[in-house]
Image (tube, grey):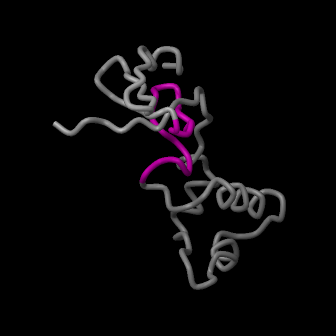
Amino acid sequence: MGVEDVLVVVVVTSNFLRVRALNGERATAMSKLVPRNDRGNVIGEAHHRAQLSDADVELILYLRFEAGLTYPAIISKFDDGGFAPSRETVRDICLGKRRGQLAATYGPAIRRKKP
């Protein structure tokens, strides 16, 4: 689903640009574009439950495959008092089980209506 599939009608009301979508979703013109996979789901650091940035994931992959560090050594690089990923998270990122999707499209960050 591309951007052209989502955006249908643009309505200008009271100096505020509002974009209406096909299925009742809405996004403002100020919405930033977020990466989506081939099924249209938000991926990467734009996902609402993401705890690692895309730069952190790239650093993990670099430290594992270019620098040849082990999982505990990679985790120690993140141990600065903030969030440190678990060994399982680092393993899953390196094996491609997590954060291994490529962006198929970019679309607006759409807020869904509450039922």
User: x, y (%) of residue 86?
Assistant: 52, 70
Queried whether the magenta region covers residue 71, the answer comes back as no
Residue 76, quarter of the rendered image: bottom right
Q: Nearest the camera: 108 or 101? A: 108
Residue 57, quarter of the rendered image: bottom right
User: x, y (%) of residue 106?
Assistant: 58, 30
User: x, y (%) of residue 36?
Assistant: 53, 33
Q: Nearest the camera: 91 or 9? A: 9
Q: Residue at x 58, y 27 (%)?
A: 105
**In the rendered view, would you say 45 is above or below 12?**
below
Queried whether the magenta region covers residue 40, the answer comes back as yes
Q: Residue at x 35, y 17 (%)?
A: 22
Would residue 22 appear left or right of 93 to someone viewing this image? left
Q: Nearest the camera: 44 or 24? A: 24
Residue at the limit of the structure toward the right, as seen here: 66
- The part of the chain drawn in magenta is 30-48
> Which SS type dominates the magenta stretch?
loop
Q: Residue at x 29, y 24 (%)?
A: 24
User: x, y (%) of residue 13?
Assistant: 37, 27
